[in-house]
Image (spheres, grey):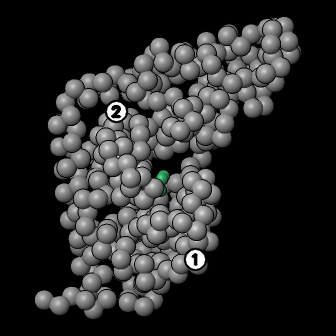
């Protein structure tokens, strides 16, 4: 039996520049996947507007920044289709049809949405667009018949809801959509430099792919370590120590790192020594990305032309799916 082709679709909400957490958790993976899979990468501006509808400039200005982060990280437009969600009318149309297949109760039960609603303090006054963004996300995915979605743990409920919608559609109108599989990231989630849950713009605790060497140094030097490790001689703790958390990810010299950890725990290794080691590694990772980014940023038209080209290609694919959907739903009149 022929294997179903694997079509990958991933994306980000454009609400700011991308950071090291994005790089480790998803960008690196996309660069690898594009060699073996058909891959769509969407800049989810419509989704970004569901909780930023009152701040269109933030979303607008983030679109080219995210595109720059993609290209600088090695997402290759010859291998991946980069496109802007709002420019694909078929996604909006599919969303309308899919909304019939989902109950409000089900939308309110989605744990990811529930969490986000709590964080944003919406309560009962949640915008309907925000509550139903998983339906729009199902449309992002199904418009391309994508069946492999690289995600972090927090997005699993959205994939589950996508499958419910696809199954219900197929049952009622006929088989159009594939089953969608999540591809769970194996990369650990990077904490913010303050040791708080994750890097976020609002907490200002992220290291960005666009950061200068000086900014990276400043951020590493203020990283949260072990508050009880005051003098170098004091025994230090590794748990919750952001510098060691990062070293575990970026330091490939495992023996050297094990030795450093032992010394730190015993006492006699100062924070600055450990931070310097991490700093050198981060400069090595981010340096080439930042340089490519700076180079590309000098030609914004070139960058947006790439996105326009990807968007055009994406539109053709999504329109074809929409035609099949309308046929199946018996709303193809002429
Ligand atoms: N919800 C995703 C995020 O915020 C972004 C996104 C929008 C997405 N549409 C998608 C991810 C489709 C995967 C597939 O991270």
Q: Marks 2 and 1: CB-CB under 8 Å?
A: no
Horizontally, residue 69 falls left or right of residue 315, namely right
- Spot occupied by residue 43 in the image (x, y as percentages of width and height): 35, 51
**At x 45% / y 89%, what residue is drawn?**
171
Residue with the mark numbered 2 = 72
Q: Residues within 10 Å of mark 1 (few under 14, many from 20)?
A: few
- Residue 293 horizontal side relative to residue 203, left or right: left
Q: Position of residue 75 (x, y in %)?
A: 34, 41
* Numbered mark located on residue 106 in the image: 1
Q: Residue 273 versus residue 193: which sits nearer the camera?
A: 193
2 vs 1, front mark? 1
Nearer to us in this view, 167 or 106: 106
User: Relative to 30, is 241 on the left or the right?
Assistant: right
Give the vertical position of 77 relative to 193 (above or below).
below
Element class at badge 2: helix
- Distance, label 2 to label 1, CA atoms, is 39 Å
* Residue for point 30% across, 74% down: 93
Examine the rendered structure and indicate whether residue 185 appears above or below residue 260: below
Residue 61 percent location from the top left of the image:
31, 41
């Amino acid at each position: 039996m022929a294997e179903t082709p694997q079509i990958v679709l991933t994306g980000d909400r454009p609400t700011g520049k991308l950071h090291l957490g994005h790089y480790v958790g998803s960008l690196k993976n996309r660069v690898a996947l594009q060699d073996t899979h058909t891959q769509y990468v969407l800049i989810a501006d419509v989704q970004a507007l569901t909780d930023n509808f009152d701040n269109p400039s933030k979303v607008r200005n983030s679109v080219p920044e995210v595109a720059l982060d993609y290209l600088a990280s090695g997402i290759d437009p010859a291998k991946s289709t980069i496109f802007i969600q709002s420019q694909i009318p078929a996604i909006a149309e599919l969303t309308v049809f899919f909304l019939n297949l989902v109950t409000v109760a089900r939308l309110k039960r989605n744990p990811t949405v529930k969490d986000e609603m709590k964080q944003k303090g919406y309560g009962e006054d949640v915008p309907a667009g925000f509550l139903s963004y998983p339906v729009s996300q199902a449309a992002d995915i199904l418009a391309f018949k994508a069946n492999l979605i690289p995600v972090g743990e927090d997005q699993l409920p959205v994939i589950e809801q996508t499958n419910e919608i696809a199954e219900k559609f197929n049952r009622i109108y006929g088989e159009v959509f594939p089953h969608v599989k999540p591809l769970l990231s194996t990369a650990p989630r990077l904490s913010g430099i303050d040791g708080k849950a994750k890097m976020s713009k609002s907490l200002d605790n992220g290291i960005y792919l666009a950061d200068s060497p000086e900014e990276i140094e400043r951020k590493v030097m203020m990283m949260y370590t072990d508050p009880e490790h005051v003098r170098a001689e004091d025994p230090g703790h590794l748990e919750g120590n952001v510098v060691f958390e990062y070293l575990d990810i970026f330091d490939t010299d495992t023996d050297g790192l094990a030795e450093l950890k032992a010394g730190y725990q015993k006492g006699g290794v100062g924070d600055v020594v450990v931070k310097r080691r991490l700093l050198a590694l981060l400069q090595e990772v981010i340096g080439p990305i930042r340089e490519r980014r700076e180079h590309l940023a000098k030609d914004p038209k070139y960058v947006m032309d790439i996105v326009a080209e990807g968007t055009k290609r994406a539109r053709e694919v999504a329109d074809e799916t929409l035609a099949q959907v309308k046929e199946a739903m018996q709303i193809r009149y002429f």
